[in-house]
């Protein structure tokens, strides 16, 4: 028995964050994600880069998705051609906690879809409560 092929290819690169992510592989308590982003990187909005894909055309619909089920964080047509497409995402669009995320492009004209592989990251916008003040 064979598997049904996906309706898209996974040829896109994973979206990258221009802010440095936090390495969570060496934490005292294990985390589900290998890297994370905090308030400084997410608030008021974060800047992400997406490497150019093959046969880029103005009008290609590009977006970034996160969460379970995946929700579009940003979705819009490509305006210009270049080696990197920068996208800006408001902080309130990111679900707090460990979330899968990926990029998606639907090509103008033929509607062919490409995605990046899914990666998980800890998005943390809340401020920890910390200890109680001394009495």
Image: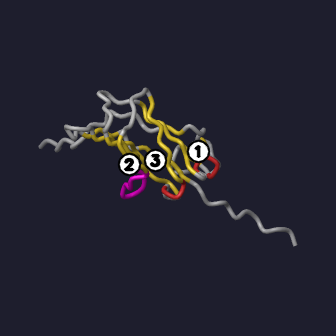
Specify which label sits upstream in the sequence, 2 or 3. 2
Of residues 61 and 4, which is closer to you in this image?
61
Which residue is painted at 42% across and 49% down in the image?
Answer: 74
Q: Is residue 68 magenta?
A: yes
Magenta-highlighted residues: 65-73
Identified at 87% across, 73% down, the residue is 135
Q: Which residue is mark 3?
A: 120
Q: In the shown orientation, is residue 33 left or right of residue 8?
A: right
Q: Which residue was labeled with disc 1?
A: 24
Q: Confirm or deny contact between disc 2 and disc 1 (CB under 8 A).
A: no
Under tag 3, what secondary structure?
Answer: strand
Q: At x 53% / y 51%, what residue is drawn?
A: 122
Q: Which mark is residue 127?
A: none
| Alpha carbon separation for disc pair 2 and 3 | 20 Å
Secondary structure state at the residue bearing disc 1: loop
Residue at image position (43%, 44%) is 119
Q: Which residue is mark 2?
A: 75
Taking depth in this image into account, of 14 and 29 the one nearest to the observer is: 14
Label 1 crowd bin: few (<14), some (14–19), many (20+), radius 10 Å: some
Query: Given contact means CB atoms under 8 Å apart, are the residues at marks 2 and 3 in contact?
Result: no
Please tell me which of labels 1 and 3 falls first in the chain: 1
Q: CA distance from mark 1 to mark 3?
A: 12 Å
């Amino acid at each position: 028995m064979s598997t049904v092929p996906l309706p898209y290819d996974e040829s896109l690169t994973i979206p990258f964050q221009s802010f440095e992510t936090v390495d969570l592989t060496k934490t005292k308590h294990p985390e589900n994600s290998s890297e994370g982003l905090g308030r400084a990187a997410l608030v008021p909005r974060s800047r992400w880069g997406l490497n150019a894909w093959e046969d880029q055309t103005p009008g290609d619909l590009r977006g970034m998705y996160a969460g379970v089920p995946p929700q579009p964080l940003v979705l819009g047509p490509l305006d210009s051609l270049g080696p990197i497409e920068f996208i800006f995402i408001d902080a309130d669009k990111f679900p707090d906690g460990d979330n899968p995320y990926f990029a998606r492009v639907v090509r103008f004209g033929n509607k062919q879809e490409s995605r990046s592989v899914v990666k998980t990251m800890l998005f943390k916008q809340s401020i920890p409560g910390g200890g109680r003040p001394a009495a």
